[in-house]
Image (cartoon, rainbow, N blue to C red):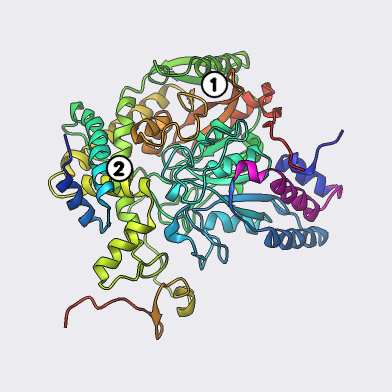
Amino acid sequence: MSKALYELTIHEALEGMRRKEFSAVELTRSLLERIEQVEDQVKAYLTVTADLALEQAAAADTRRRAGEEAPLLGIPMGIKDVLCTAGVRTTCGSRILENFIPPYTATAVQRLLDAGMVLLGKTNTDEFAMGSSTENSAYFPTRNPWALDRVPGGSSGGSAAAVAAQEAMAALGTDTGGSVRLPASYCGVVGLKPSYGRVSRYGLVAYGSSLDQIGVLAKDVRDAALVLTVMAGHDPHDSTSMPAPTPDYRAALTGDVRGLRIGLPEEYFIVGVQPEVEAAVRRAIDALVDLGAEVRPVSLPNTDQALPVYYLVATAEASANLARFDGVRYGYSAGADSILENYRLSRGRGFGAEVKRRIMLGTYALSAGYYDAYYLKAQQVRTLIKQDFERAFEQVDVIASPVAPTTAFRLGEKTDDPLAMYLSDVFTITLNLAGMCGVSVPCGFDRQGLPIGLQIMGPHLGEEIVLRVAHAYEQATDWRRRQAPLSIEA
Amino acid sequence: MHLTIDDVRHVADLARLHLTDEEVRLYAQQLSAILDYAERLQEVDTSDVPPTPYVLPLQNVMAEDVPQPSLLNEVALANAPDKADGFFRVRAVFEE
């Protein structure tokens, strides 16, 4: 029996359209039907742009008939709802932006559109990307397609769940402390977090500006490499985007990891890691050794400090970034009698609990008398964490670890304990602090059938090497062929 | 480390956030727990360690001083809660 169109990878779909086996409109209809079938269970999307998607698909078919080839021509994708899309509501998962229609499109999204992408809709997210479970969305939680009583991870949980449930061929997410890699791990898909500066952040609603980076959720490593190739590169609208050449990342997928040095950081194999997670990750590393890679122990001794550093730096930056939501230029306004009271009420009512908590923490860390003890201290320890990685990458090509200490937890399990929730990010935030790149690739399932992710970390602008390792491992295993067991509603 | 109710009210004031009494009580407790956890940073010796505010080697990126297209007035105002005569409208900032 042949596959339904929504089941294809991007590369399979491009090949099928090239051979005229089906059109972009047929492919898009298949995805939209899939969304209708499973979205009530998964709740991955905040907005589905069905009419726009069919228009864009028809335009893609016209371009293809005219002989044009573009890297994503007619490929339907989802976009995390923190990325601005001109004319399409962009909420950031927040009530304060419930009716916000951006006047312009984020560069990363525009590059995908120019390459022929079809926009299926905007995916659910923790409010302003602040969270590890997507339960902080002001609208509704997204559910893990592998177990509907579990979280998909966050904050790009809508994007990861959409790909895992085959409601999108791929999706963009953002990763400030693990928000692409964690949901990729929990949902059993590939999640790529590029190096800081690799992808323009223009049109991304800012959370932690020294940490934020746009990434990809995809069905396999080749698809992720293709999407990165399209969206990476310098953008005059973002002065933090690197003026470095961008390769075709697919060329790095040679399948050859012979002689490659893989570092194993002892600090990431600790008490508290679910035994099945550790076992799956160790088996994955054995598989890479079988393919010819070498394993060396490395030490990242300041790993223990990463979580407090992150939650001081990210919240300090957030408290400044979110000052723009003042009820004057856009977003919810309380309509109070004085301007000061209007700021306070618009923000107090418009923001949800986690966003307010982080604004408070960041404001405190930056306030007079505490700046040196918290914010400055955190930035100094950040230097030590970055140096840990720089030293390790003098000895090894990549570093391998679990993505998260456990598989997906239950909805509601950690909502009352912010610190327990923050600990989900303990293995992913270090890379953001160091500005480096990493990928989550499926490496097995626990006894309850929940996906486990292997994290491959690389140095700054080392996307080619992490993608090569992830791809070699993926191709040597069959995990990507398993599909989330969703029932189809009649 | 412990944040008092008054500390929380002061920080909320700085952040221009209206909080309910319930939120003030909850944040006093939760932020204290998070700051207690962050105390471990004080154990790290950071004498002579420079801060990392930003990981890239890029500094002072300049744009050419040439006019670029920008948003039209009505487009820039399209999401405004209140506007008049091509401006954002707010309550008076200064007393008469």
Binning the other alpha carbons within 10 Å of mark 2 as few (below 14), some (14 to 19) or many (20 upward) gives many
- Residue A159 in the image: x percent, y percent? 57, 44
Relative to residue A195, is residue A317 depicted above or below? Answer: below
Asked if residue A83 shows in the view, the reply is yes
- The residue segment tinted magenta is A19-43
Which chain contains the residue that carries disc 2? A
Please state, as top left, top right, bottom left or bottom right, where the N terminus of chain B lies in the image: top left
Q: Residue A313 got which mark?
A: 2
**Secondary structure, magenta segment, majority class:** helix
* Element type at mark 1: loop
* Element type at mark 2: helix
Q: Amino acid at mark 2?
A: Val
**Going by the image, does B20 lie left or right of B88?**
left
Whether the magenta-drawn stretch holds residue A374 is answered as no
Please state, as top left, top right, bottom left or bottom right, where the C terminus of chain B lies in the image: bottom left
Residue underneath mark 1: A260
Binning the other alpha carbons within 10 Å of mark 1 as few (below 14), some (14 to 19) or many (20 upward) gives some
Q: Residue furthest front?
A: B22
- Residue A192 in the image: x percent, y percent? 54, 38
**Going by the image, does A69 lie left or right of A299?**
right
